[in-house]
Amino acid sequence: MIDVRRTRIVMALLAVVAVLLAGCSSGGAAEGGRQTIRIALDWTPNTNHTGLYVAQQEGYFRDAGLDVQFLPYNNTSPDTLVSSGAAEFGISFQDSFTFSKAAGADITSVMAILQHWATEIAVRADRDDITSPADLDGMTYGGFGSAYEVPKMRAVIQAAGGTGEFETVVLGTAAYEALYAGEVDFTEPFVAWEGIEAQLRGQPLKTFAYSDYGFPDAYNVLLIGNTPWLEANPEAAAAFVQAAQRGYQLAADDPARGAELLMAANPGAFAEPELVRRSQEMLSAEFLRDESGAVGPQTLEKWAGYSGWVFDSGVLTGPDGAPLAQRPDFSTWFTNEYLGTP
């Protein structure tokens, strides 16, 4: 086990070094006096990233004096890349961030991109034998290998009246095809992407929202920054975050235009424009704004809700790999100070 862990650490470090060498810049001055900022994407471009590409296409970054470079997805998580300084900012998720931060990652959440869970438990719509998460006892979950998945699934199943006992196979994104083929019984898609994609291909899904069963809500997608860089560059940090916030605000207010700008920034990346348009409409209607209608803010209540649940469950581990003995101060994990006012 020790050798495997060391091997994984070495591989992660090598990936970080590769990105550093490829990026060569570390937030310095770009041509024309603009400051270079790198953002690490969590996946190939999709509607979780629309606001960033809107800011690029509409010139918000340029007008803020920034030269923003998008680092393409690779096998090293944005949490690791941002913490190491290989990128100033990155796309993350409250669940993965919670484990990374507890383990010592030097990262801070600077903006909530999605205000609520946008992933749900999903089964094929034709599974008449599954009408509640409780029916998933003894079935097979197609997962992605993250530490937070199984505890969350178990908690929701138990809250629905089940025992929370099921089999898990780690498939990554192949989990969706495995679900369609009946090789696994349930998985965890983004309803505004894979959920719509399933409808378009004639294989609709039936989904169960975690919060419908008392599970804490969370910021499903985050914009995170390297903590030391943020502290050393407050003006550049605010300029970047506010330009990104403005981009997401446009995507929330005018989803049709947001979708078109995302596709224009990534020509040839989307085989189904209808998927992009419908996804952006769903995010605009249900996920991009908080209860007051604002785009971006975070609250201690929501951070302490989900991340506190993870700690209380005993599965949150520190830098030494042992369960945390002391509850983290979640108020230090995020900030709204770089956001603009609506």
Image (cartoon, rainbow, N blue to C red):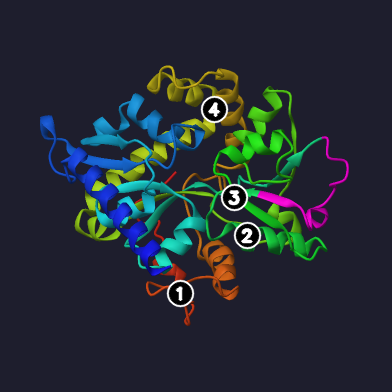
Q: Which residue is mark 4?
A: 255
Quarter the N terminus occupies? bottom left
Quarter the C terminus occupies? top left
Disc 2 on helix, strand or loop?
A: helix
Q: Is residue 339 visible from the viewing direction of this image?
A: no
Tag 4: amino acid: Pro
Tag 3: amino acid: His
Q: Earlier in the sequence, mark 1 or mark 4?
A: 4
Disc 1 versus disc 3: nearer the observer: 1
Q: Is residue 336 left or right of residue 234?
A: right
Disc 2 versus disc 3: nearer the observer: 2
Q: Residue placed farthest to the bottom in the image?
A: 325
Q: Which residue is mark 3?
A: 116
296 vs 71: above or below: below
**Residue 187: percent from the left, percent from the top?**
66, 46
In this view of the protein, which residue sits in the foreground, 145 or 317? Answer: 145
- Whether residue 48 appears in magenta in the rendering, the answer is no
